[in-house]
Amino acid sequence: MAYEYEKQVAIKAVTLAAQLCQQVRQTIRPEAIEKRDRSPVTIADFGSQAIICKILSESFPNDPIVAEEDAAVLSQPEMAEYLAQATDHMQSVLPETTSEALINWISRGNGQVGKRYWTLDPSTGRKVFCAANNMQLHSL
């Protein structure tokens, strides 16, 4: 079956991201920060993107990923506490997470559209697409 491996990797990534979202939802206030465009972003948003980008990058290192969140906001000194919280939550799903790794995984989503690429649905963060055939691989 075409794209079977891609589908399995996407399911694994989205499942781990959903686990993080559940954990964040149960343990903290739904506190969000405001991005430059005035839209909100939460620890769950950053964490979901980080997990999905990490897993996709490990299996498909040459495939760009186009996602919504930008790690630059977390890299600002005034966001140190928020970054620490995000890192702590990520460690519950991926124990090897460091703040630097979290920033790098999120930044992997700054890719450009190419012949073959992955995209995370920016409206929900819970859909993963492989755009080699514009085929949706998994959705929660």
Image (cartoon, rainbow, N blue to C red):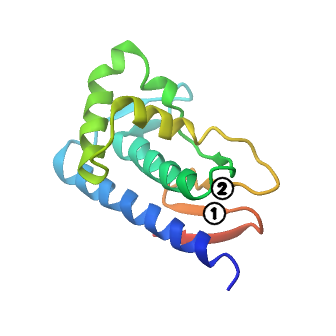
Q: Residues within 10 Å of mark 2 (few under 14, many from 20)?
A: many
Q: Which residue is more in the foreground, 75 or 44?
A: 75
Q: Residue at x 27, y 47 (%)?
A: 95
Q: Quadrant of the C terminus?
A: bottom left
| Rendering coords of residue 25 (x, y %) | 25, 52
Q: Residue at x 30, y 45 (%)?
A: 90
Image-based side of 97 in relation to 40, left or right: left
**Amino acid type at image mark 2:** Trp
Q: Residues within 10 Å of mark 1 (few under 14, many from 20)?
A: many
Residue picked out by circle 1: 129
**Amino acid type at image mark 1:** Phe
Decide: is 88 above or below 35: below
Label 2, label 1: how many angstroms apart (C-alpha)?
6 Å
Closer to the N terminus: mark 2 or mark 1?
2
Decide: is 111 above or below 5: above
Quadrant hosting residue 132: bottom right
Residue picked out by circle 2: 118
Count of numbered marks: 2
Image-based side of 94 in relation to 120, left or right: left
| Rendering coords of residue 31 (x, y %) | 29, 37
